[in-house]
Image (tube, helix red, strand yellow):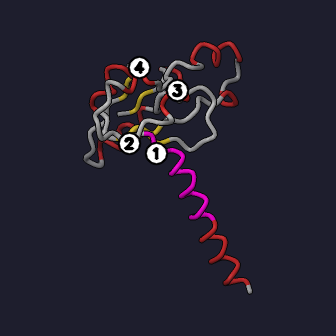
Amino acid sequence: IFISAPELQLEPAVVNKIKDSGSQVTVTDQLDDAIPNLDIIYSTRIQEERFTDPNEYQKVKGQFQLNGKVIKGCKNDTIILHPLPRLDEIAADVDNDPRGIYFQQAENGLYARMALLSLVLDRML
C-alpha cells in the first residue's frame, strides 16, 4: 500500500510493473483508511526539493504525520520505520511506542555502514 499526496504518487508505469510481477498494489492518499491494514509503516519526509513551486510543497507538508492518535489504529505488532532525521512526519509521542523502531533502525544502519567501510578499506590495503 503506497500512501502519498496525489502529486507524489507512483507513476502508473511503476505501479503496473509491480502488478505485472504478481504483487497486489494499492495507491491511496488516505492514511487513516490504510493504517489498520499495515504490517510495516516506512515513513519518510516529503521532500521540499522535489517541488518547483513552494506553494505546492506547503499544501502537502505535514499531511501524513504519524502521531499517537493515528497509530492507535495500527495493529499491535505493526513496525514503524523511518530513515531519520525527521521533520514533522513522526511526532515525538510515537518515540516511546514499542512499534516505533526507527532509532534501532538508525543504529543498525551505523553498524552496517561501519562493516561496509571496513570491508572496502581491508581490500584496499
- What is the spatial separation of the Cα atoms under label 3 and label 1, in whole angstroms? 25 Å
Instruction: Give the foreground label among 4 and 2.
Output: 4
Q: Which residue is mark 3?
A: 8
From the top left corner, tell me how far across and down residue 41 is, in percent.
41, 37
- What is the spatial separation of the Cα atoms under label 1 and label 4, in whole angstroms? 18 Å
Q: Which mark is residue 79?
A: 2
Evaluate if marks 1 and 4 touch, with contact meaning CB atoms under 8 Å apart. no
From the top left corner, tell me how far across and down residue 58 is, in percent.
64, 15
Q: Main secondary structure of the magenta part?
A: helix
Taking the image as drawn, is residue 14 in sight? no
Instruction: Give the foreground label among 4 and 3.
Output: 4
Which comes before the other along the chain, label 1 or label 4? 4
- What is the spatial separation of the Cα atoms under label 4 and label 3, in whole angstroms? 24 Å
Drawn side of residue 19 relative to residue 10, left or right? left
Q: Residue flagged by tag 2: what amino acid is it?
A: Ile
Residue 112 among magenta residues? yes
* Element on which disc 3 rests: helix
Drawn side of residue 2 relative to residue 20, left or right? right
Q: Which residue is mark 1?
A: 101
